Amino acid sequence: KNEVEQSPQNLTAQEGEFITINCSYSVGISALHWLQQHPGGGIVSLFMLSSGKKKHGRLIATINIQEKHSSLHITASHPRDSAVYICAVRSETSGSRLTFGEGTQLTVNP
Amino acid sequence: EPEVTQTPSHQVTQMGQEVILRCVPISNHLYFYWYRQILGQKVEFLVSFYNNEISEKSEIFDDQFSVERPDGSNFTLKIRSTKLEDSAMYFCARQTGHYGYTFGSGTRLTVV
């Protein structure tokens, strides 16, 4: 079993829809990251969470430490949101490295 | 925060050749990382580098790999004798703040 599981693997939405991407992990963590990867391959950090909720523009990230679960929400989705969204965790016992999920491919159609 | 710049953006090399991938963090940060992503797969940790020494490495990071910070600003990953399975996107990253990360733009390595 992977330490970090994301769902869904692929998600297609219409412009304007509310989107949720989920991440579950099996280890104790000190931080969880949500990352965005565009077709060119570059990775951009969206959020780092250790508790609660963070909001940046149309993006909201939440984490429930007890349930080992995090969600990334996109409100009023737009075609430019199309990308791969990746959850990665910093384990309490694995130094400072990140362990990555497989990613969720999001496609937002106009 | 300044970006992390990686060069080259794309490199094609023959199997058995040595390659050096470069990263310029442009700062005095202490913690740096190399990750790789084979096409269609998830990102994998290779090595972390703290205060000019390797602090952690994965099982992928065998004797074919080495890292250096030769001049205090550049940060390099060397693959001594490339294999076809080394074809991947390689990312350097630096730690920002307590647990934050900034990733480089990546180098796509193609071994033929």
Image: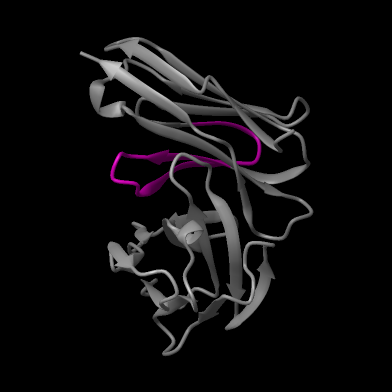
Is residue A36 visible to the viewer in this orientation of the structure? Answer: yes
Is residue B96 visible to the viewer in this orientation of the structure? Answer: no
Check if residue B89 falls in the magenta segment.
no
Nearer the observer, A19 or B9: B9
Check if residue A44 falls in the magenta segment.
yes
Q: Quadrant of the N terminus of chain A?
A: top right
A27 vs B85, left or right, is right
Residue A2: x and y, percent?
70, 36
Please name the residue shown 61% across and 75% down the image: B50
Asked if A101 appears above or below A96 in the picture, the reply is above
Residue A104: x and y, percent?
47, 28
Please name the residue shown 36% across and 58% down the image: B106
Furthest-bottom residue in this view: B71
User: What range of the chain is rendered magenta?
Assistant: A33-54
The quadrant where residue B55 appears: bottom right
Residue A102: x and y, percent?
55, 35
Prevalent SS, magenta region:
strand
Please name the residue shown 43% across and 57% down the image: B87
Furthest-left residue in this view: A110
Residue B45: x and y, percent?
59, 57
Please name the residue shown 41% across and 90% down the image: B71
Q: Quadrant of the C terminus of chain A?
A: top left
